Image: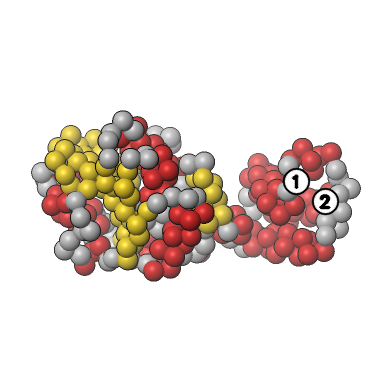
Amino acid sequence: MLIKEFKNQFFTDLKGLYPQTEIQSFFNLIIEYKLGLTRIDVALQPEFDILENDVTFLNNALIKLSKSTPIQYILGETEFFDLVFKTNSNVLIPRPETAELVQSIIDDHKNSGEIKILDIGTGSGCIAISLAKNLPNAKVYAIDVSAEALKTATENAILNNASVKFIETDILNSEELPGNFDVIVSNPPYVREAEKQHMEKNVLDNEPHLALFVEDDNPLIFYNKIGDLAKNHLTKNGNLYFEINQYLGKETAELISQKGFKNVQIKKDIFGEDRMLKSSI
């Protein structure tokens, strides 16, 4: 099959399912991933003959996209904070908002001496690994309840030559953390069941619900537990960082303030939504 033929098929099959610009982006990503061809290469070589094995992969990728499988899961990887992370259905796909949280921590601590950082609910390891790579004086620990997620996170640490200690722990049933820390960060489950109706189908059908959802009657369960543990395991003037539900910013800030944390600040993300919370002890 010629690449121009596959491109025509690709755009025809996905028309109406995604915006045109997104279809183009998917096409560029898949072609560069599998064939090593850039957008310019494709434009200059419309008669490029795709090998049969590659055609099979490309057609399978097209079928998965038509069924709303995220491109990151199809390729098995994504980029986050200028690093490549393996992705699969056991971990959430790293998002731009989370990169803002990482950047905030780096900005606050880039001139610090040796510090200890704990990432709670690490998933793919994107927060912990990005911090380890960008804060060379940091000792980074990361915990998660999912053994499969930790397996992926460990692979990502190796892939990116990052030093992170991973620990399997159910935070809701923990009374202690693995030591004291200067920074504790978490992007815990925070989407209420009632909010499912507003979410994209490809998220609901593919990403792990364990890492996404909380019960409507106790949406701050993870913030409450982590706040309690952080009180006893943050060093003096240590910082607690959260990614938060944009609809529950005020409630989350009040909860953390009531626990005795000071300088509680909410920051907006690139979309203008309340998304990050920072406090100190």
The residue located at (83%, 56%) in the rendering is 50
* Marked residue nearer the N-terminal end (1 or 2): 2
Where does residue 167 sit, x and y in percent of width and height? Answer: 32, 63
Quarter holding residue 132: top left
Is mark 1 in CB contact (under 8 Å) with mark 2? yes
Left or right position of 52 against 228:
right
Colouring rule applied to residues: secondary structure
Q: Nearer the viewer, residue 45 or 21?
A: 45
Give residue 136's position: percent from left, percent from top. Answer: 37, 40
Say which quarter of the image contains residue 42. Answer: top right
236 vs 189: above or below: above
Q: In the picture, which quadrant includes the N terminus?
A: bottom right
Say which residue label 1 marks: 37
Q: CA distance from mark 1 to mark 2?
A: 10 Å
Residue at (79%, 41%) from the top-left corner? Answer: 41
Residue kind at label 2, given as amino acid type: Ile
Q: Residue at x 28, y 51 (%)?
A: 118
Q: Position of residue 162 (x, y in %)?
A: 43, 50
Residue at which label 2 appears: 3
Depth order, front residue of 42/10: 42
Pick the quarter of the image with the C terminus: top left
How many marks can you see? 2
Secondary-structure class at tag 1: loop
**Circle 2 crowding by C-alpha within 10 Å: few under 14, some 14–19, many from 20:** some
Q: Amino acid at mark 1?
A: Leu
Left or right for 83, reference 239: right
Density class for disc 1 (Cα within 10 Å; few <14, some 14-19, many ≥20) is some
- For the point 56% across and 54% down, the residue is 77
**Which of the two discs, 1 and 2, sits closer to the camera?**
1
Compared with residue 11, is residue 169 higher up or lower down, i.e. above or below? below
Q: Secondary structure at mark 2?
A: helix
Residue 189 seen anywhere in this rendered image of the structure: no
